[in-house]
Image: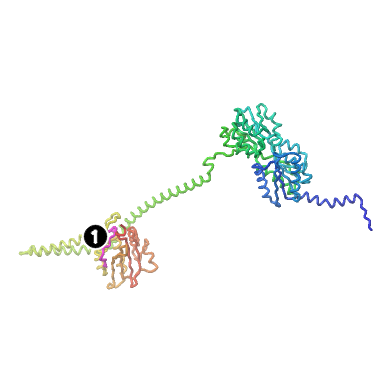
Amino acid sequence: MIKLSISLKELSVVLAALLSPCSLIAQESRVPTILVLDQSDGGPFYYQLLAGLRGVVSNHAGEYVTIYGENLDLSRFSGAAFEENLKQYLKEKYRDKPIGTVVTVGAATTDIALKWRDELWPGVPVVFAMLDDIDFARLKSTSNLTGVIVKLPLMDPINVARAVVPALDTIALVGDAWKGLVVYRNWGDEVGTAASGLKVVDLVGLKLSDVRNRVARLPAHSVIIYSAVFSDGEGKFYLPSVALGLIAETANRPIVVAADTFLAPGGIGGYVLTPSAIGVEVARLALKIIDGASPAEVPPVYGGVKPIFNWKQMQRWNVSESRLPPGSEVYFRDMSAWETYRRQILLTTTVVLMQAALIVGLLRERRRRAFAEVQVGQRSAELAHINRYSMAGELTATIAHEINQPLAAILANTETAEVIVNSPTPDLKEVGEILADIRRDDQRASDVIKRLRSLLKKSPFELKDIDLNDVARETIEFLRALAVAQQVNLTGQISQTQLPIRGDPIQLQQVTLNLIVNAMDAMSGVQPAARRVTVSTASDGNTAELSVSDAGPGIPTDKLKDVFEPFFSTKPQGMGVGLSIARTIIEAHGGHMTAQNRAAGGATFMFSIPLATATQ
C-alpha cells in the first residue's frame, strides 16, 4: 500500500490551477439566454417593451439568443405563500434551462429577483427596467446589477398640468395604492413638496366606481393626474389602459398621464414612459453582458421618457400646442390632406403637370404642323405653277404650231373670200362656206389659247366633281401637236364608263401632261416608227386609275425607288421636280402614284384616286 502525503498549501495550489480556467471561461462567455420578468399581468405596455427588446436581440450579430418571458402579476397577488409558490414554480420550470441574464421590469420584480437570485440563478447578472432614482439609490451597492433608470418625478406631471390649465389650482391624484405601482410608487412621498400651493384631491386607492363619480364633479382649473389602476376595488381587475378609458368617460377635466399606452384611452399626455424605447435600451445592456462584459463595465443609463401629447384631447380641452413643453411630440393629429397624402399629391401633381406640358407641347406642335402644312401647300402650289410655266416653255413651238395652223387657214380663206366678193358674179354660197371655215379655225385657235391659259392660271387647290376620262382626253388633245412634231404615236384607251372623282382638274391635267411629256422624252433615242405612248383610264374597285406607258428603254431597276424623290432626274437638263410635284398633287387627292417597267420594254407610270361614289 502506497501512502500519499500532500500539504494544505500544495492542495490549494492544485485546486487553484484546476478551477482558474473554468472561472476564466465563465467570465468570458455567458449562456445566450434572457429571462424577462415583468411584475404586471401582461398588457400593451409590457408587449411594446418586449417588442423593442426582441427587435434588438433578433439583430444580434453574435450567437443566437433565446428569450423567455414571465408575467408575475404582482399588482394583483402578494403575500409570503404566493411568493414562495412563485419561486418554486420558476425553480422547477427553469431547472434545466441555464439563464445568462435576468431582465426585470419594475421595482417590485427587481426586489424579488435579487432576493431569489442566489437560489435560482446564482451569479447571473440582473438588468432592470424602469427603476426611478430613489429605487436605484436603494440598490446601488448591489453587485451584478445594471439597467435603465427612468426619471419620472411627480413634479413633471404637475408642470404639465400647469401648462394644460394655466390657472391651475387643483390636482386630483388617481391610481392604485402607491406601494403596488411600478415606477409611480414614490409619488406618494413627493406630493407634499411637488404639489405645494395646490389643492390636492386624493383619489388614490378608491373603488373605480367612486373614482368615476368624483372625477365627474371636479372644479374648474383642475387637472387629473393618473398613475395606474389595476383593480376596481370590488374584485374586478383591469389593464391600466382599460381602467383609464372608463375614468375618461366621466371625467370633466383633462387627464395627465405618464405612459404612452394611456394616450389613446383618453389621456391628454405628459412626460410619458415609452416602452419600446425602454425595451431597446434594456436589450443593448443585456447583450453586452451576454457577449462577455461584466455588469460593472455596463453602467446604468437614463432613458425611456419624453413629452408626448394627444391631439384629440388637446382639441377637446382647447390646449394650444405652443403651451406644451419644448420637444413635445403630438399623436393622433388630424392630418391635412397634404400631410396624409403628400407623396400621392406630389406624384399626381407631377403627372398632371407633365401631361399638361405634353398636351401644350402637342397642341403647339399641332399648330406648327398645321401652319407648316399650309405653307407646304402654298409652296407646292407655287412650285406646281412654276412647273406648268416651265412645261409651257418646253411646249412653245408646239403651241405656236397649233395657233399658226388655224391662223394660216383663216388668212387663206379670207383672201379667197375677197377674190370671190370682188368678182362680177360673187358665189355667196361659197363665201358662206368660207366664213364657216374661218369661224371653225378661229374656235380652234381660241381653244388652244384657252387650254394654255387654263394650264398657266394660278389658282388655289379646289376640288370639283369631274370625270377622270375628260382630263385624259383634254390632255391628249393638248399634246397632239407635240406628239406629231416628235413623231410619237399618242393614243388613248379611254374607259367607256364614267370615272367620277373629286379633284382639281388643272392640277390633274398637269400631272397627266407631265407623265406624257416625260414618256415622249424617254423615247428620244428610239426609232420614230417604234415611238408609242398610250394613255389608259380604268376603274379598279373603289378607285379610278390613269396610266401612261411608253416604249422607251425603261427605268434602271436601282433607280425605281428614287424617281419620285425631289431633284432626281434621268434627263441631262432635267430639274427633277416634275414627278415629285405630281406625286404631291396625287397624294393631296387621297391617291397614290407608282412606276414600274413593262415586260415588253418601256415604263408605265400610274396614279389612282378614290371614286367619288366611294367617298360619299
Q: Nearer the viewer, residue 405 or 311?
A: 311
* Quarter containing the C terminus: bottom left
Q: Is residue 497 magenta?
A: yes
Residue 475, visible in the rendered structure? no
> Would residue 297 appear left or right of 340 to someone viewing this image?
right
Relative placement, left or right, of 358 versus 304 is left
Q: Nearer the viewer, residue 67 or 232?
A: 232
Magenta segment, which residues?
492-506
Q: Is label 1 in a helix, a strand or a loop?
A: helix
Q: Residue at x 29, y 56 (%)?
A: 463
Q: x, y (%) of residue 176?
A: 68, 35
- Residue at the extreme left: 424
Taking the view exactly as shown, the residue that stands out farthest to the front is 235
Q: How is the image coloured?
A: rainbow
Q: Which residue is mark 1?
A: 451
Residue 527 visible here: yes
- Indicate the quadrant where residue 539 lies: bottom left
